[in-house]
């Protein structure tokens, strides 16, 4: 997607000289903000069948906890993210044909949103699934990491177009 010059000027993590900076949110009012994100771990059916018998433990439960921890530690991982008081974080992992669907839900009451926390949560959960299953198959792939929706703040509500997600699901089942 090409950005026009007016959009580039909206990139708040850069100062007028082009240097990276942390955005000052001290004058923003704390409000309730939520975000949901998605990731997909593509793996052969033979791997998903073996998940309950994994000698390292239940990979999906370990990944769920890792994703929740990641949401709470996002500012430690992404340099310009603000540390936020996460009031809720959850991860759902569903085995589907072709792999595992991962979805995060994160909430805060803060002066800035939790999109990065939701995206970090699904990313780390997906990496944990890989770590817990790589002994079975090293060709497992992680992908389709994207924001599903966010609510709150100055920009209001955003929801990913349903067609984008549905097309990906159809492609996987072919």
Image (spheres, rainbow, N blue to C red):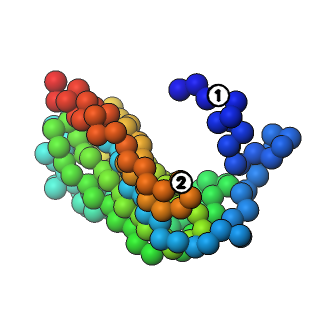
Task: Depth check: give the residue in front, 8 or 89.
Answer: 8
Left or right of 138: which side holds 171?
left
Picture coordinates of residue 103 (x, y %)? Answer: 32, 53
Task: Depth check: give the residue in front, 112 or 5.
Answer: 5
Q: Secondary structure at mark 1?
A: loop
Task: Give the numbered dot on residue 4.
Answer: 1
Picture coordinates of residue 79 (x, y %)? Answer: 67, 54
Residue at (71, 48) in percent of width and height: 13
Residue at (28, 62) in percent of width and height: 61
Residue at (19, 48) in percent of width and height: 95
Rate crowding at label 2 as few (under 14), some (14 to 19) or many (20 or more) other CA atoms within 10 Å.
Answer: few
The image quadrant of residue 154 is bottom right
In this view of the protein, can residue 134 be seen by the observer?
Answer: no
Q: CA distance from mark 1 to mark 2?
A: 19 Å
- Choose the circle earlier in sequence order: 1 or 2: 1
* Number of numbered markers: 2
- Decide: is 39 above or below 114: above
Left or right of 53: which side holds 65?
right
In what quadrant of the picture does the C terminus appear? top left
Task: Give the numbered dot on residue 155.
Answer: 2
């Amino acid at each position: 997607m090409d950005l026009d010059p007016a959009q580039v000027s909206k990139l708040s993590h850069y100062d007028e000289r082009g240097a990276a900076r942390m955005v000052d949110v001290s004058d923003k009012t704390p409000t309730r903000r939520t975000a949901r994100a998605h990731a997909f771990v593509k793996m052969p059916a033979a791997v998903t069948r073996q998940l309950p018998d994994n000698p390292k433990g239940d990979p999906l439960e370990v990944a769920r906890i890792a994703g929740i921890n990641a949401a709470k530690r996002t500012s430690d991982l992404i340099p310009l993210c603000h540390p936020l008081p996460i009031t809720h974080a959850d991860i759902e992992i569903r085995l589907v044909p072709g792999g595992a669907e991962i979805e995060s839900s994160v909430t805060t009451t803060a002066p800035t949103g939790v999109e990065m926390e939701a995206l970090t949560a699904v990313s780390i959960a997906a990496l944990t699934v890989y770590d817990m299953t790589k002994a079975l198959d090293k060709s497992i792939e992680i992908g389709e990491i994207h924001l599903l929706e966010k609510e709150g703040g100055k920009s209001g509500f955003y929801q990913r177009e349903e067609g984008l997600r549905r097309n990906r699901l159809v492609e996987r089942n072919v």
